[in-house]
């Protein structure tokens, strides 16, 4: 790397890095924390509900005369939603959202196979 040694070090970014209000200092830090907490709870609750729904549908289809692919798809979709709920609880809400979408899509494939 042959970059200049006297390049701008962005002192204003490092000075405000510990401030919860952010570099602007406009006081929106407390709202960001509340929004993040709400997103974690929402992702966790939605994942739990979808997991329970997928497991219930899998058990109902397993006792019926549906092909084996149908309860397997519901169970796999429920497992993906459970992983999304786990990631949502850990603060990875964007990945959790995509996993919840993928889990519901897998369950929809099982529903269409019925």
Image (spheres, helix red, strand yellow):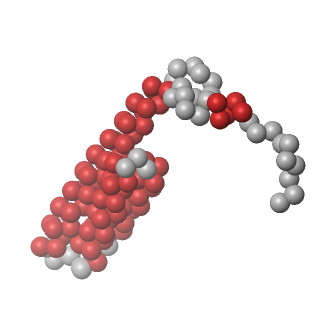
Q: Say above or below: 60 vs 40.
A: below
Q: Residue at x 21, y 56 (%)?
A: 52
Q: Is residue 25 left or right of residue 56?
A: right
Q: Classify residue 58 by image quadrant.
A: bottom left
Q: Classify residue 31 by image quadrant.
A: top left
Residue 63 showing in the rendered view: yes
Q: Nearer the viewer, residue 70 or 56?
A: 56
Image coords of residue 69 (percent x, y): 28, 77
Q: Residue at x 37, y 36 (%)?
A: 37
Image coords of residue 75 (percent x, y): 26, 68
Residue 108 showing in the rendered view: no
Residue furthest to the front in view is: 5
Image coords of residue 95 (percent x, y): 45, 54
Residue furthest to the bottom in view is: 68
Q: Say above or below: 73 vs 33.
A: below
* Image quarter of the C terminus: bottom left
Q: Nearer the viewer, residue 112 or 90?
A: 90
Residue furthest to the top in view is: 26
Q: Residue at x 84, y 42 (%)?
A: 7
* Image quarter of the N terminus: bottom right
Image coords of residue 65 (percent x, y): 16, 77
Q: Is residue 79 left or right of residue 57?
A: right
Q: Residue at x 39, y 40 (%)?
A: 39
Q: Say above or below: 6 vs 105.
A: above
Q: Nearer the viewer, residue 31 or 18?
A: 18
Q: Nearer the viewer, residue 52 or 25?
A: 25
């Amino acid at each position: 790397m042959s970059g200049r040694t006297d390049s701008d070090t962005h002192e204003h970014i490092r000075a405000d890095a510990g401030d919860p209000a952010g570099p602007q200092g406009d006081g929106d830090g407390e709202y960001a924390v509340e929004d993040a907490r709400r997103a974690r709870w929402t992702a966790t609750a939605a994942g739990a509900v979808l997991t329970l729904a997928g497991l219930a549908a899998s058990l109902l289809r397993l006792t019926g005369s549906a092909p084996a692919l149908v309860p397997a798809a519901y169970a796999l979709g429920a497992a993906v939603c459970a992983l999304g709920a786990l990631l949502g609880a850990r603060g990875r809400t964007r990945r959790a959202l995509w996993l919840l979408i993928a889990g519901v899509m897998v369950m929809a494939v099982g529903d269409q196979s019925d």
